[in-house]
Image (cartoon, helix red, strand yellow):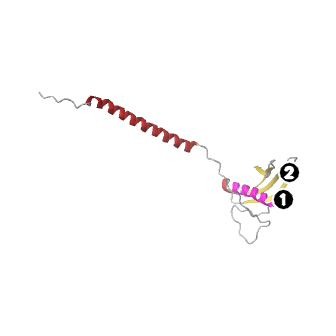
Amino acid sequence: MNATAPASGGEDRGPRRILIVLAGILIAGCVALIATAVWLALVLAPASPRRTSLQTIVVPDQPSDSAPATPGISTGRLEGGLTDPLLRAQVWSTIESFHTNVRGCDEVRPVNIEVTQQPDSSGSWEEGWSIVACGQAKVLKITFTVPPDGGVYYDIAE
């Protein structure tokens, strides 16, 4: 019987192949683990605050009788309080946007602005803004805060 001898090094090929396959599986597993970690970091990480640019908002002092009423657009007068016209327009824009977009009101209009607390030693004060939103009259409490570094912050509460 003629038996053929195994090729030289044939006995070493089996364990060597197993090590190569195991190394490949280990590398693939590490790549998958890293990819999963990066994906989770992107999906679960809180969104970074986005900066928005302020724009000048023009609010007419008197409603135009010739312009038709548009849902979400105020048709009342926006007067009173201690704020300047630009800050008053920014606060009103926030109120109007909230009631139109979040509450789904078809009409939001100002009625009156009244100072409910005069400025204190830090310059902060409160105003009551009477509005009609979604057909209901309500008074919003607006607290204006003057920080030491300048500017004015406002907080709106129902």
Q: Which mark is residue 65?
A: none
Q: Furthest residue to the front?
A: 8
Amino acid at dot 1: Gly
What is the quadrant of residue 137 in the picture?
bottom right
Q: Is residue 38 magenta?
A: no
Foreground residue among 43 and 80: 43
| Residue holding disc 1 | 80
Q: Secondary structure at mark 2?
A: strand
From the viewer's perspective, tell me whether residue 34 is left or right of residue 88: left
Residue 94 in the image: state x and y as whole percent.
Answer: 72, 55
Foreground residue among 125 and 35: 35
Q: Which residues are magenta?
A: 85-99
| Residue holding disc 2 | 116
Q: Furthest residue to the bottom?
A: 66
Sooner in the amino-acid sequence: mark 1 or mark 2: 1
Amino acid at dot 2: Thr
Q: Is residue 88 magenta?
A: yes
From the viewer's perspective, tell me whether residue 71 is left or right of residue 25: right
Question: Which quadrant: the N terminus?
Answer: top left
Q: Using the image, determine if residue 95 lies above or below residue 36.
A: below
Using a 10 Å C-alpha cutoff, classify the residue at mark 2 as few (fewer than 14 neighbours), some (14 to 19) or many (20 or more): some
How much space separates mark 1 and mark 2, taking CA atoms?
12 Å
Residue 150 in the image: state x and y as whole percent.
Answer: 80, 51
Residue at (53%, 41%) from the top-left corner?
Answer: 40
